[in-house]
Amino acid sequence: MWSLHCSVCSYAQPDGLQLASLCPDCSQPLMVRHAAAVPRDRVTAERSLWRYGAALPFVPGETAVTLGEGMTPLLELPHLAKEIGVRRLWVKDEGINPTASFKARGLMMAVTRAKALKLPGVCVPTAGNAGIALAAYAAAARMPCRIYAPDTTPPPIVGSIRAFGAELELVAGHIGDAGKATMAFAKESGFFNVATVREPYRVEGMKTMGYEVAEQLGWRLPDAIVYPTGGGEGTIGIWKAIGEMLDWGWLPKSAAKPKMYIAQAAGCSPLVRAFKAGEEKATPWADPVTHASGLRVPGPLGDRLTLRCLRESGGDAEAVGEEAIRSGTFLLASTSGIDAAPEGGAALEATRQLVASGRLARDAEVVVFNTGSGASYRW
């Protein structure tokens, strides 16, 4: 069984089946903790992330809300390894998930818990892809759904949200402004606000990316993982999975943890700034600007957890300019056939910059994440 624990203070909620949001004592994110090790032989042959169902906050007998998410390709690209200057390079392509991004993993888990708890509806602020994912999984669960998005959200993303039947409110400003509107609506409606790390379940879906990387590499870990990061839940989830696999014996105790690197846009890089300044939390970024909408998150609630992950792993953080993001996106798509999103392009260019500056070793084996489909941005 599993319970909920604060990521900062000593608060614990033994009954994980109750509705949970932020820690009631310190308002920091709660995290799921299993009471006992989950053996690796509990991993099934299912061709989705539900192969790891024993390691998820799911109760047998409940209804899993699933569209077949997870088990995305991990593609080794020797030509890009040579181009970037590392020994080996793989791209984990999250763009082929249902709803065309990694957000499917986390929102699947949040909606599954919301349905099990018989909540009246779900809502979320979004920079784009989370809105599509919540709208789709709410439709699959037959649950009411309200999405708040900046009015600068790319039209294909807006169209997809509406196509899944969600109520969509476009908000002037950025995702922080959408977040304020979402909190007000959740308070008056009773809908479950599933904003990034405001509840403990999305990270649980995200951590399956870490399990998959290890399994697809033959139950071993790369030297480094480079992840494009806005709110931080993907980075946080992968790092949580690595700790669990080592604690539970899925990997040898002697296995070295990978260094975790994040990529942000130069026009919105609060986590990069905080990391370089040695700070434990990030100061919100004024006037965030980037065409990589998933990176346009000026004040991530997961800032402490993300920065902790970077420091515990010996990793780093890198900001990438707009033209470099475009260049990386085109390079990834045109030379590999991966329909790269700008966030994936940012991660690839961040990898190049980290190697060039000597902060990522040239003999490293590196996994770079493309977190979404480029089709969502073309209009």
Image (cartoon, grey):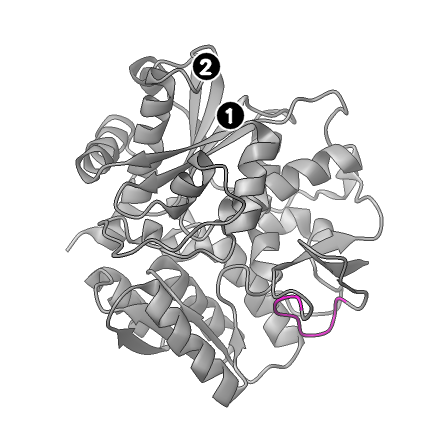
Q: Is residue 298 above or below residue 342?
A: below
**Which residue is denoted by mark 2 in the rendering?**
361
Give the image location of residue 266, x and y in percent.
Answer: 27, 41
Task: Specify the quadrant of the image occupied by residue 78.
Answer: top left
Left/right placement of residue 373 relative to residue 209 reads: left
Task: Specify the quadrant of the image occupied by residue 130.
Answer: bottom left
Left/right placement of residue 118 relative to residue 279 reads: right
Residue lying farthest bottom? Answer: 188
Badge 2 amino acid = Ala
What secondary structure predominates along the stretch shown in magenta?
A: loop
Q: Is residue 40 above or below residue 110?
A: above
Left/right placement of residue 366 relative to residue 55 reads: left
Residue lying farthest left? Answer: 379
Magenta-drawn segment: 16-23
Q: Nearer the N terminus, badge 2 or badge 1?
A: 1
Q: Are marks 2 and 1 in contact (CB under 8 Å)?
A: yes
Q: In this rendering, does residue 365 appear at all?
A: yes
Element at label 1? strand
Q: In this rendering, does residue 370 appear at all?
A: no
Give the image location of residue 319, x and y in percent.
Answer: 32, 36
Local crowd size for mark 2, using a 10 Å CA cut-off: few (<14), some (14–19), many (≥20): some
**Which residue is denoted by mark 1 in the rendering?**
224
Badge 1 amino acid = Ala
Q: Which of 146 and 49 is in front in this view?
A: 146
Element at label 2? loop
Asked if the stretch drawn in magenta spans residue 236, the answer is no
Which residue sits at x=40%, y=70%? Answer: 179
